[in-house]
Amino acid sequence: MAKEIKRTIETILNLQTGEVLDVKDIFRNPLIREAEIFKLRSQIQEQVHKKRAVYICIFCKQSIGIRGHINRKDYYLTHTFRSDDCIIKTNHHLTEEQIRCVKYNGEKESDLHNHLKNQIAHYLELDDKIIAVHTEKVFKDLAISKEWKKPDVMAELADKKIAFELQLSTTFLSVIVGRTIFYRDRGIFLIWIFPNFSLDSHLQQFTQKDVYYNNSFNVYVFDEDAQQNSKNENRLVLKCYYKCFTIKNNNIQEKWVSAFIGIDEMNYDTEKMELFFYDSIKEKEILTKLLAEQIDEQIILDQEKAATYKAYHALKYLREFYRNDVEPIPRSVEFPLQHIDTAREIEIFNKEIGFNGNKINVISNLFQSGTKPNFLQLVCEQDNILVDTKNMMVDGKSLFQYLIYMESQWDFYKKIPLLFRKGYKLSDVDYDYFHNLYDKNYFNTTESEREAIERWAFIYCLNSLWHKEDALSLIHIKKILFALLSLKKDLSIGNKFTNLKQLTMNILTYNSDFGKLYINALKKFDQYDRQLLDDKSGKLKIRIDEFFISEPLQNRQFDRIIFEIFPEL
Ligand SMILES: [Zn+2]
């Protein structure tokens, strides 16, 4: 089966300029450009007539003509009458690659291409450092080779070979990558040379990734300026356009810059077989890294600034609070301390306050004197205010040792929870003081003995907490905690009852919302059977039965605290 043969021509070459033209472009907007198309048609006919064809078929180099159905504004290109064979007229078997190659070689047949090639070769020959210069000949025969041609110009230096390939149009940019690899594999450096380079029109094409990366953003041009410079210097001078990168407003900016260069001013990387005048890729890499570092530094600076600002406001608030021992602003409106939450903010803020350092005495004094209680409570409740609790001393003793022997019972119950709320951990000496509070010889008879046992019990509870946030809540369930601890220690704590049976009666009567928990504790701490056995009048049994019949609603609000202190329950 013969495949369909297309007789119309898709691509033509301008023999003078080397321009490769596409049929779609030549006949674009046919309605508007009718006059223009007809003018070109007459021009082509005249040239053919004089046997000086400028526009030729890129495959066979034969002259072409414009034909068309005038009424339909439908134009096409065709070979002239009685032309010889052309691959597009025959049932050819060329591959895509070969077709690309034929077109590419065709471009090299133009006058401009020939002129520039000879100029480049001429200036290279004037250079002492160059041993030999080879120029590819123009093929005078009609057929254009379907093999890739040798480079336009090849210069041999003592230590390297450089191939020069002229690119008159940007049609074949796709070829560049393949050709670059071809020469690289043979240990030959390749320089693409363009007749001109307009930043406006070519920029977009040159920003194509594959072209960049093979040329390090460097573009070599042999335009009129370069030719003049070559003439003046008696050697080949090229105009090199390269991308220059800068950092501006936290962005990498780029612009094209140009310089006149000789081939000995290029950098030749013999390992990668790449050459460049200006290493724009490296520059971009360095600046990208630098910019990232600058941005990181800026972020840190900004964070530091913001942290200092927040710390300043919180500090101002705290100082005002200290002065009058009242909140300067109601907390519902604004509470600057809530904004101090990152590690750095906490660090800056606390360095200024100094409660974690040389101003620790301020806090131990407040504990001791009892002045500014609201301020002290704020300091103890705010976890972002750091206090060096270990170093709070009164008269050479730890604050803990001081507080447990405070005269006022009220002060004791107010201050000891604050100390634990702040995360205080007992030292070994503190433990000795703590254990000494509860003398086993105490019989809970005198007021002072009872008080000492109660203090011991309260510290026992505080010290058993896992969550320091709960320390200030203990006071609300002190009676229940003491009742449970009484059962555990088999000793009346916090009451004047002579036996624990009375305690059970009391709890089930007045604190029945903790009744279930209490009865459970009775059983767990082996008090239940003992108390019932001792219940001669049967009143206790009746009270317990009544409790289970009435089933009062149980308070579960403090479960976490209770189970932390009494894990066995
Ligand atoms: Zn042809």
Image: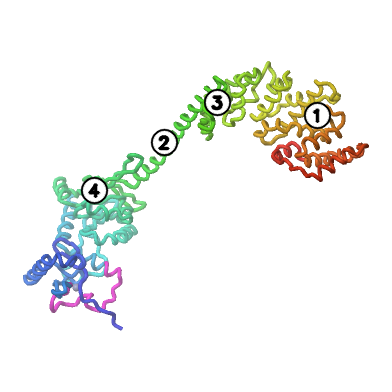
Q: Position of residue 457 (x, y in %)?
A: 77, 29
Name the outermost residue toward the bottom. 1
Whole-angstrom CA distance, mark 1 to mark 2, is 62 Å
Q: Position of residue 501 (x, y in %)?
A: 86, 34
Residue 432 to residue 501: above or below: above
The quadrant in which residue 551 appears is: top right
Q: Sequence-wise, which precedes: disc 3 or disc 4?
A: 4
Whole-angstrom CA distance, mark 3 to mark 4, is 72 Å
Residue labelled with disc 3: 327
In-front residue for pair 71/175: 71
In-front residue for pair 384/275: 384
Q: Are marks 1 and 2 in contact (CB under 8 Å)?
A: no
**Residue drawn at point x = 34 percent, y = 47 percent:** 281
Give the mark toward the camera: 1 or 2.
Answer: 1
Assess disc 3: are there few (<14), some (14-19) or many (≥20) residues with their C-alpha within 10 Å of its C-alpha.
some
Q: Sequence-wise, which precedes: disc 1 or disc 2?
A: 2
Q: Position of residue 159 (x, y in %)?
A: 29, 51
Residue labelled with disc 1: 493
Q: Sequence-wise, which precedes: disc 2 or disc 3?
A: 2
Residue labelled with disc 2: 298
Whole-angstrom CA distance, mark 2 to mark 3, is 36 Å
Q: Is residue 307 magenta?
A: no
Give the mark toward the camera: 3 or 4.
Answer: 3
Q: Quadrant of the C terminus?
A: top right
Q: Sequence-wise, which precedes: disc 1 or disc 3?
A: 3
Residue labelled with disc 4: 240
Range covered by the magenta-colored residues: 75-100
Residue 163 to residue 408: above or below: below
Main SS of the magenta part reads loop
